Image (tube, rainbow, N blue to C red):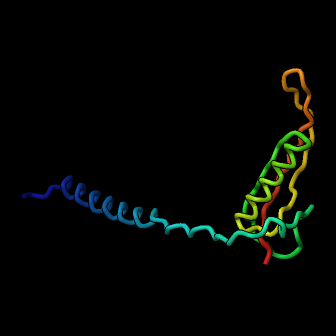
Amino acid sequence: MHFTPLNHLHCRLTAWLAVYLAVAGCAAHKAAPTPPVTYPATSESALRELSRLPQGSYEKLAIITVAAEVGEQLASAIKGAREAAAQRGADALVILKEVEYRQNVGRRTLKVRRISYLAIRMP
């Protein structure tokens, strides 16, 4: 086989392309993400409700939002949020935002409260 300058250029381009793809393949490889830390469930009765974030260190576990009609529905929704936080191993719920508003449903006007909590675990 006789190499012409064009054949030689083609071989060099192919070699550089192979090197580039090999390096790009290595660079694009990501390590497997570490699984999230899980904690044993805590007691719902021991769960504290805080109005602001604590001063010391803590770990954010989840944001839990409830929205329900003020009264029995809201109490039930808050109980569900506390149960969910306790199942994740939280020992405190921090109130991030609390909003109360009126919502029209048919001919009725309901008073609704939406509360966003941050479930945290403190050392």
Front position in the image: 67 or 54: 67
Residue at 89%, 73% in the rendered image = 55
- Residue 10 at x, y percent in the picture: 23, 55
**Residue name at image x 13 percent, y 58 percent:** 3
Name the residue at the top extreme: 107
Residue at (88% x, 63% y) in the render: 49
Q: Is residue 50 left or right of residue 83?
A: right
- Quadrant of the drawing holding the C terminus: bottom right
**Residue 98: x %, y % from top left:** 90, 49
Query: Furthest-bottom residue in view?
Result: 123
State which quarter of the image contains the N terminus. Answer: bottom left
At 90% from the left and 25% from the top, the residue drawn is 108
Residue 4 position in % (x across, y down): 15, 55
Instruction: Please say if 77 is above or below 85.
Output: above
Which of the 4 quarters of the picture holds residue 89? bottom right
User: Which quadrant of the structure image shows residue 51?
Assistant: bottom right
Estimate the x, y position of residue 30 in percent, counting from the top left: 49, 65
Give the number of callouts.
0
Query: In the displayed structure, would residue 95 be above or below residue 89?
Result: above
